[in-house]
Amino acid sequence: MNKHEGKKTEELAEQLVGKRVFLNWPFLQEGLCVAVSDQHFIHEEGLVAGETRIVTKPQTMPDTWRRKADKIEHIYSKRFAVLTGDIDALVHVRPLRGLKRLDTGAFVKDYEDADKEIEQAVQLAVTEVFSEDQRFLEKEAPPLSEEFPDGSKVIFLGEHAYGVAAQVRETSATSLTVVLAFFPNEKAENDQFIQLVRSRPLDRYIEAHLVSRMLGISGLAFARITSSFMVITKEGQKTNIGLSLKFEAKGMKVLGYTRKGRGRNWEFSEKAIQLIREYKQFAPDFFHRLDQRRDDVTMAQDLFPSGDSDARVKEIRNWLHDKGIPDLEPTSLLSEQLDKDTVGKIEQLANNFSSSKSADMIKKALVKGIPRQAVLKPSHTVYRLLHQTFALGDRVTMVQDSGSVPLTVKGVVVGLNTTSIDVVWDVPFMSGTTLGSRCSQYRGSTVSFNSCLNLSHKQYVMSTNPIPVSPTNNNANHANGHANGSTQNGMPFHPVNAPYGAIRGFSSMRPPRGAMRGGRGRGGVGIMQNPARPAPPTLNGGYDQAVKGELPAAEPAAAAPSHTDVLRDMLIGGSGAPRARGRGRGFPGQHNGPVRGSGHHPNGSQSSARGAPPVHLLPSVPFAPQSQQAQPAPAVFVDRGRGRGRGRGRGRGRDRGRGGFRGGAPRGRGGPGPASQAGPQVQHA
């Protein structure tokens, strides 16, 4: 029975588009209806005068639509024994993918993209069910005190302590207070690991046609011997006597031996070339007859007509076994890994760092007023880190509290696979492996992408800038074939606004330096040396006021920096000298101390409150966007002239042109005319 019989397609679209339906009757699967179509028109949602309405578009290929409808009717009739009747309308449904976690903490349903859209007969679409699937029920954001109870372990995602282990001290209605624990020299250690990997010697690969010419083998024989080559003995047993270094149909290679080049041609390393050369020396008669037999499966007596062919095949098989050919593990063409020597150097460097650390070197800091998005709960990694990317040599930390690797243990990426990464950890643990004899016992493991946080390339930094920066995709020329999103030079693509729990609405830009002195307001971040000390007093201004566009009250001029300020500057990389007071952003390395202004504050600087408790460790990083206020332009840009002049002369001489630069002499077709009276006044320092 078709309950939609007699209804117009426009009426069906008003009832179904934008609402959930269940497809694949009788085995129902939830989805989102995005359009309803018939043989002549398709009805879908669109913007009309700024409002979302149902718009109608003509079918571009009505014959294709009719074939799809007939196919659906035929499948249900012949395969499922269901008579659907005439299909006059189709619903376009995007299946339910699962739940995704928003920045607010709420869980909402997530549907597939347009490329996985399914077309279903309207009479087979179910709009209501008696029992909901409890796994995919949307949930409101829980209170912070419930989601982050006091004492719970989290990972901090701030700019200055990214990936540091933290513990929740207390929560309010809109923010958290956490205690950070870290070693001050971790940033320098991460840079040394990256430099070690980048300075490793790279293997040399040669294209297949050059290798075959070098070894004196035809192209056909070379292609057959480097892949699987099956022969049948007299007893009817199949034996592979090929080297199995490449698998074209499966899209697989052997790490360290073969790879696909830029031109999609096979390339072989020097290790593989030496192996083929030794094989040719051991079995020259076999290589001589490879061009003569072109069958997919060859008989052993055809390859070795003289003597016992089965004994010769067994002898070749034993030689391949001694060379370790059966132990070579094929991997995807998108996989990459570091060699054993480089992994050993990484282990040694990690051991040196671990031996120089002690418990009394751990620093603690209290961070107040941070939003929910600035911390990562271990159980939320499957929602928030789905689109994280890695490159060889990246420094990572374990952020999942379930599994074999302890929480917050750090390591280095030594292998990239399609769905996982190989990591050598700084410390051994019980369930650790050797990663195929590439590292020491109990030091390696293979983990999924969403179980680790990339410390070398920060992709989920919580920024204070409310204007999101559109991401730039650098994956177009990735040498690994877009396996892990890394670019060709090893730098990965950073998804600022990833759809799975990335920090939406926040960019990866550095926070203004002028806002790093601490103690500005309720929404700011206060950091103290001793977490037991009382919190600083509430000052003027805050996160709510900044969002509404209210400017903070003007402050008196800052006094000379105290010994406490100088000590704090030294801990964050400054030299303790008086701070620069410029308006621009600049870079920390260009000044003796961090600059005080960011160019966005009305006064150009933002001094700390002298009545607040002393700060001895990190600079305050308030999670409050700075107010935007236009600044007067420099003198060189104030008087810019009258625009594009045509000039007064039209000669064809050397000075003919389109005029001077903007704000300079008028544009002309010939020589330079009289100078504009509105030219720029450039003052030299």
Image (tube, helix red, strand yellow):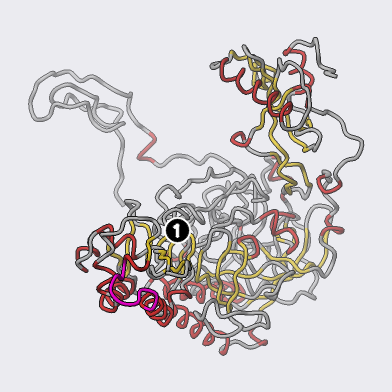
Q: Where is residue 407 in the image (x, y as percent from the top left)?
A: 70, 73
- Residue 410 visible somewhere in the drawing: yes
- Name the residue rendered at 79%, 33% in the picture: 25
Crowding at mark 1 (Cα within 10 Å: few <14, some 14-19, many 20+):
many
Residue 433, compared with residue 391, is above or below; it is below
Element carrying mark 1: loop
Task: Specify whether 546 is left or right of 285.
Answer: right
| Three-letter amino acid code at the position of disc 1 | Leu
Dividing the picture into quadrants, the one containing residue 152 is: bottom right
Residue 661, compared with residue 284, is above or below; it is above
Q: Where is residue 447 in the image (x, y as percent from the top left)?
A: 62, 67
- Membership of 73 in magenta stretch: no
- Membership of 309 in magenta stretch: yes
Q: Where is residue 591 in the image (x, y as percent from the top left)?
A: 44, 65
- Name the residue rendered at 45%, 69% in the picture: 239
In-front residue for pair 292/204:
292
Q: Which residue lies furthest to the left in this view?
A: 653
- Residue 520 visible somewhere in the drawing: no
Residue 265, compared with residue 655, is above or below; it is below
User: What residue span does the magenta drawing correspond to?
Assistant: 303-311
In-front residue for pair 304/508:
304
Number of numbered discs present? 1
Task: Specify whether 55 is left or right of 411.
Answer: right
In-front residue for pair 666/654:
654
The residue where tag 1 is placed is: 333
Q: In which quarter of the image is the N terminus?
A: top right
Dividing the picture into quadrants, the one containing residue 313 is: bottom left
Task: Specify whether 216 is left or right of 557.
Answer: left
Q: Position of residue 377 (x, y in %)?
A: 74, 62
- Name the residue rendered at 91%, 40% in the picture: 131
Q: Which residue lies furthest to the right in this view?
A: 130
